[in-house]
Image (cartoon, grey):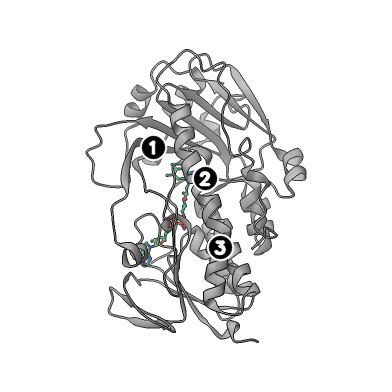
Amino acid sequence: MGAMQDLEIAVVGAGIAGLTAACALQRRGFRVRVYEQAERLGEVGAGLTITPNAAHALIDIGLGGDLERLGVCPERGGARHWRSGELMARFERGAALAERCGAPYVQIHRADLHDALARAFTAGEGSSLALGHRFERLLENEQGAEIGFANGMRVRADVVIGADGIRSAVRGQLFGAGHPRFTGYIAWRGLVPIEALPPGLIEPQSCISIGPRHTFTRYLIRAGRLVNYVALAERDDWQVESWSVRSEVSELLAEFAGWHEAVRTIIAATPPELCFKWALFDREPLANWTRGRVTLLGDAAHPMLPFLGQGAAMGIEDGLVLARAFEASGTPEEALRRYQAARIERTTFVMRKSAETGREYHRADADDYDTHPHTTAESLGLMAYDPVVASL
Ligand SMILES: Cc1cc2nc3c(=O)[nH]c(=O)nc-3n(C[C@H](O)[C@H](O)[C@H](O)COP(=O)(O)OP(=O)(O)OC[C@H]3O[C@@H](n4cnc5c(N)ncnc54)[C@H](O)[C@@H]3O)c2cc1C
């Protein structure tokens, strides 16, 4: 064991990005302590698309079996016209895409992935996950940092990784709090049991319908037993302070009036307790994520709109590249420099492209949806990246 392996690395935030980083570091022999504000682990939310670029990282940390067991690997994807429902574009997924990229394209319940990550981390050697620890303060010195929590605890760490999401308190301590800005989009997320729908409706298995100022994306999770959807709309009148609230199914149906039958049937079949809405926020890209021995990772570093389905994927990639940078470096400063240099350009690109893609999909002109080419993570080449071998 070298000096690098003796470092005490603190990860703030046990979301998908923080836990991926923690597992990847742990598997490379580093000592990691994760601090999470929640008293109990448990992801909220619904489905998540794990594109091959992120699947590489999850397989590297030993979650390949979980992806296979818990996820759905759709054979085909597609884009439908919002009003006619006509299939305007087909995307090959399944074995063909997995072969091309060297890793699968998987759709999974967030809670299932989060649970698999937490189990992998806590089963690993020397792991520690402290719940009920809300990070508040950072006191740095040359050798590392002392971090203070709302519960009065203080701990020393040689390196601190802020993986505490879009409202990151670590980011606030490094670069000033600022405020995430409301993007004008709101999202509804729903889960519908497959048996509540007429047979043959979910074709292709993964599908986006695109129309004026709205999109509706749906796919299967939990071995095909549940349909997960994300419905996005533009609003300038968002008044609700809360970040995630239950929504009425009737409100969502009214929002998608005039849309093709399959969309409306899925919305109408949503059990009332499984329909949520929230406002989408983002931030300007940062030119630097690191100060001293403290850096940012995942949404804390680069929150983005969901139009390319890459937010969690970027955090997962970050985690793996961070661990590789520590493995390949002689000092923590070098590791953080290499991590940031390897990641910032790609994530900034994806942030900007996610916002642009939202504007492309949501343009107000209703009539040219059948001719317009659609930007996707695939068409931008994002799926070809492999964080396990990408240069550092
Ligand atoms: C509608 C929608 C659809 C999406 N679809 C996809 C998709 O298909 N594919 C995809 O890749 N991404 C998708 N995303 C993006 C994805 O959800 C996020 O990018 C991802 O969850 C961010 O993970 P994270 O671990 O960085 O942050 P978070 O999930 O926010 O986790 C942060 C963690 O830190 C903890 N924390 C916060 N503050 C503190 C503190 N002060 N002290 C200690 N702990 C703290 C929190 O409790 C939490 O556990 C979508 C997002 C939205 C809104």
Quadrant of the rendered structure where residue 113 is? bottom right
Residue 312: x %, y % from top left: 51, 51
Report the Cα–Cα distance between label 1 and label 2. Answer: 20 Å
Label 2 sits on what residue type? Answer: Val
Q: Which label number is shown at residue 277? A: none
Q: Which residue is label 2 attached to?
A: 350
The number of numbered badges drawn on the structure is: 3
Q: Earlier in the sequence, mark 1 or mark 3?
A: 1
Report the front residue among 129 and 180: 180
Query: Which image quarter is the N terminus in?
Result: bottom right
Residue 255: x %, y % from top left: 35, 24
Residue 318: x %, y % from top left: 55, 59
The structure residue drawn at horizontal position 53% and vertical position 60%, both measured from the top left corner, is 115
Q: Which residue is label 3 attached to?
A: 319
Q: Is 204 left or right of 367, judged from the image as shown?
A: right
Dividing the image into four equal quarters, which quarter contains ligand 1? bottom left
